[in-house]
Image (cartoon, rainbow, N blue to C red):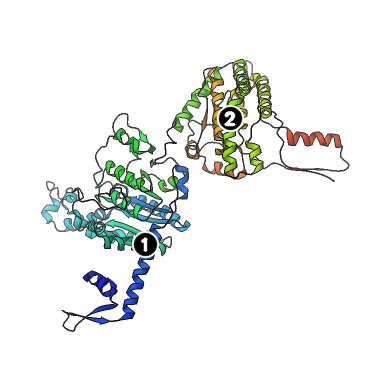
Amino acid sequence: MSMCLRGLGLYRGAMSRGRFLQPLKNGKSFSVVSSPSVGAYLAKQVSRQNRTLHSIHDRTRAEITERSQLKSARRMVVKLGSAVITREDEHGLALGRLASIVEQVAEYHVEGRECIMVTSGAVAFGKQKLTQELLMSMSMRETLSHADHTRQDAGTMLEPRAAAAVGQSGLMSLYDAMFAQYGIKVAQVLVTEPDFYNEETRRNLFSTLSELISLNIVPIINTNDAVMPPMFIVDQEVSATGIKKGIKIRDNDSLAALLAAEVHADLLILMSDVDGIYNKPPWEDGARLMHTYTSADKDLIKFGQKSKVGTGGMDSKVTAATWALDRGVSVVICNGTQEKAIKHILTGRKVGTFFTESTVDKATPVDQLAENARIGSRVMQNLSASDRALCVNTLADLLISKQPQILEANAKDLDEAKKSGLAKPLLSRLSLTPAKLESLAVGLRQIADDSHRNVGRVLRRTKLADGLELKQITVPIGVLLVIFESRPDSLPQVAALAMASGNGLLLKGGKEAAHSNRALMELVKEALCTVGAQNAISLVSTREEISDLLSMDQHIDLIIPRGSSELVRGIQEKSQHIPVMGHAEGICHVYVDKEANLQKALKIIRDSKCDYPAGKFNQPKFGTIQFS
């Protein structure tokens, strides 16, 4: 009833007077009938609609400034471009790619995330059917003639709007069948540009979307291409709330951006047939993929042509992405043909181009750090043992001479940790004192003294024949990735061991010790400069960079995570083709029998609790001792 009245333009007035319009028997006129119950029903429906809209606009978005935070996205919009789900011949859909994307969306939907899809493909699906009809309408002569190119030219002869009208139902049937395999219901929502210009239809649209989401249904949205005007016409802008301009609805990219902003989505994923945003067309020399894009990068990009099956080029995607970013929606443009692209994005992998206003990621790219570590490791391997020992001793001296700068940086970490409510035992681990730095320097000098036989030492000789001898010789591993937790004193210890053994090193410390780690890394770089290998050791700052490094088996030879068993398991699961040297849980309790030699037992206890393997530092371990 309410929908009919709204269509006649009489809904609002009838509701306000608590009456409704009833057609007379002739079907041409209407009479006004008083009905408080109907008025109350209509008022209830409007109230429900208002509550639904409030549930959209009152929603708090997840704050996302870097890739590692994308896993917290709860509501996301996934836009599938024509080039992603259409076959190369433009007739029909690429079922394998589409099924993979549907599977990923379905899994995240089952997890409890709210997913909205904006899809293309109706025209391609319809072209497949219309081509068959076109060929069936040909005469026998036309069918057999080699000079007739109707079959080859069928795609250009077909009207796109007609193809969309034919293909829309088939496309939705396909989506329905795929999502049904996961027990998920889908709903089709077709929109046109006027739907966004009219305040009432726009309000109804987003009320419908919110209602579908609340019912655990995946909305699948597409432009109604059967009636849409040509997408290349520049129409008026959709009004936007606030001082910022609206966006022109030219294609599904701008449509997805508008929808993501209106429903307060956390993440918008724009899937295309390219890996992301390049500084120039990918086929040109010098083209470089931009993993991170900020508004300051706009003038650095040269756009190419759009794909042959799409309505929007890369410039359209950038415009839509930046518009959505201005309204608080995080955006990633990625290659939809890449396997498990959505999963990789939500796990923090460096897939596609991530749009952000944060400038934290403007440091040296992590792949460049890994390559530098490989080059630096070769420099370290070619050094003599005395040069490597000199480098370690230089670092030990710097720990003493630069003590004020180190303690100043550590004080910043302690202040931030106290404000965040860090536990006292963790504060103690985070703290650096003059005594700790002195102990560190002593330990580093011990490493330098013991390093002369680390590389090139013969462990075993085997005589295979006269004049043929097999030797087992110690050599550097190559490049190590060491991940440690909040203790900043671990950094110079691990760096010294890498120097002494001739290895390159990438370090990732805890974020609680960020200032301390940077100060200590400056000393490491200064020590390495004395032997011309300043890039052999580098510090990695974000978890996102760790995700990237775990797949760089061409640069990294061994990963050593130092921390909880959960951290070790996580690294082992994510590492791709790189060995991970984990550690056992360890025995934390020592039981001493009453008949045992107490002096010998105390020596064993001291060795197990206090002898620190990385440089023999006296760092007590936690545990209990029980005498029985």
Rendered position, 628 above or below 614: below
Q: Position of residue 332 (x, y in %)?
A: 38, 44
Q: Mark 2 points at which residue?
A: 408
Q: Can residue 462 be seen in this view?
A: no
Q: Earlier in the sequence, mark 1 or mark 2?
A: 1
Of the residues tagged 1 and 2, which is closer to the observer? 2
Q: State the residue at coordinates (64%, 44%).
A: 423
**For residue 285, which quarter of the picture?**
top left
Q: Where is residue 433 in the image (x, y as percent from the top left)?
A: 66, 30
Q: For this rendering, which residue is in front, 453 or 129?
A: 453
Q: For this rendering, which residue is in front, 545 or 144?
A: 545
Q: Position of residue 8 (x, y in %)?
A: 21, 71
Q: Name the residue under label 1.
A: 53
Three-letter amino acid code of the residue under disc 1: Leu
Q: Distance between the residues labelled 1 and 2?
A: 51 Å
Q: Is residue 435 visible?
A: yes
Rendered position, 415 above or below 492: below
Residue count near mark 2 (Cα–Cα under 10 Å), binned few <14, some 14–19, many ≥20: some
Three-letter amino acid code of the residue under disc 2: Glu
Relative horizontal placement of residue 439, taking residue 77 as reference (left or right) = right
- Secondary structure beneath label 1: helix
Residue count near mark 1 (Cα–Cα under 10 Å), binned few <14, some 14–19, many ≥20: many
Relative horizontal placement of residue 253, taking residue 355 as reference (left or right) = left
**For residue 301, which quarter of the picture?**
top left
Q: For this rendering, which residue is in front, 515 or 146?
A: 515
Q: Position of residue 542 (x, y in %)?
A: 50, 38
